Amino acid sequence: MTALTLTRRIFVAGVGMIALSVATPSFSAETGPVKIGMIGGGVVSTNLAKAWIKTGHQVMLSSRNPESLKDKVAALGPNARAGTVAEAVAFGDVILLAVPYTAVPDIAKEYGKALATKILVIDASNPIPDRDGEFAAMVRKIGVGEYTQGLMPGAKLVRTFNGFTAVRFAEGGKKDGVQMGMPISGGDPRALGLTTQLVRETGYEPVLVGNVAFGKHLMPREPLGPEMSPDEIRRIAATLK
Ligand SMILES: NC(=O)c1ccc[n+]([C@@H]2O[C@H](COP(=O)([O-])OP(=O)(O)OC[C@H]3O[C@@H](n4cnc5c(N)ncnc54)[C@H](OP(=O)(O)O)[C@@H]3O)[C@@H](O)[C@H]2O)c1
């Protein structure tokens, strides 16, 4: 596999912007499509499936009742299938975690070891107190990235696609003709290289804002939650710890 050197800009709280050169593999045309196992078969999974199928990847959406996804995967076409959560975890080189946050601890308990073997786990899930109760408030206090990583040690976790309505994830990444950005937070160079590629394939400009703990800022009602331009993401990220 050819290594591609990507220049990444990381914002470090209170310090400003640091440019890093990191050797990360390219997953574009050189490696071809990846298999993406989706834990969840709801709004986030469906819209990301639409985007990634267009760029040649295979996806498996999942549900505790996979039969309920039959019509949805039929509409997505031959590169989509439905399965149980266990089947999606086994299927994916890459895993998308897109469930109500209250489901995350049990999923981590059951599949944590398998998730640690994957090249990338994208976590789009958010603790929302209005929906997920006290538990979500506690997780937000600790910081969701840190908390989720603690539940699944060794997983190459990247938080992205968290902040705004998932319907937009399949709409090409432009707003009134202006290029929009997608903040990403994580630490593993290979996982970040692949995330960069997958975000770009949705039409959004990936903007690395910090490590996985920094992912606490990417949610609704947080500074990096709304959809905005790459420059605006960088400007706001530079003000955050
Ligand atoms: N919707 C958005 O615009 C948006 C945008 C960014 C981030 N998010 C975040 O992404 C996550 C998913 O959102 P969504 O809108 O896609 O939710 P959704 O449409 O309600 O879908 C949730 C999925 O999770 C599955 N699920 C629920 N409990 C589960 C469990 N215990 N084990 C396994 N699977 C379980 C459900 O499948 P079954 O019930 O059929 O098993 C369903 O397919 C949430 O944390 C949300 O805050 C949402």
Image (cartoon, rainbow, N blue to C red):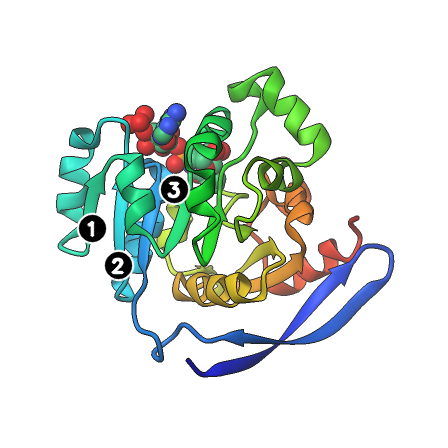
Q: Residue at x 26, y 59 (%)?
A: 53
Give the secondary structure at mark 2: helix
The amino acid type of the residue labelled 3 equals Val
Instruction: Say if residue 179 shows up in the picture.
Output: no
Location of mark 3 (residue): 44
N-terminal label among 1 and 2: 2
Q: Residue at x 47, y 39 (%)?
A: 112
N-terminal label among 2 and 3: 3
Q: Is residue 137 left or right of residue 31?
A: right
Relative to 10, say whether 19 is above or below. below
Q: Residue furthest right?
A: 14
Instruction: Say if residue 241 shows up in the picture.
Output: yes
* Residue 186, x across and y down, in percent: 61, 55
N-terminal label among 3 and 1: 3
Label 2, residues with CA under 10 Å away: few <14, some 14-19, many ≥20: some
Q: CA distance from mark 3 to mark 1?
A: 15 Å
* Residue 115, x across and y down, in percent: 44, 46
Q: Is residue 178 left or right of residue 43?
A: right
Check if mark 1's residue and mark 2's residue have beta carbons within 8 Å.
Answer: yes
Front in this rendered view, residue 15 or 221? 15
Q: Residue at x 28, y 62 (%)?
A: 57
Location of mark 2 (residue): 53
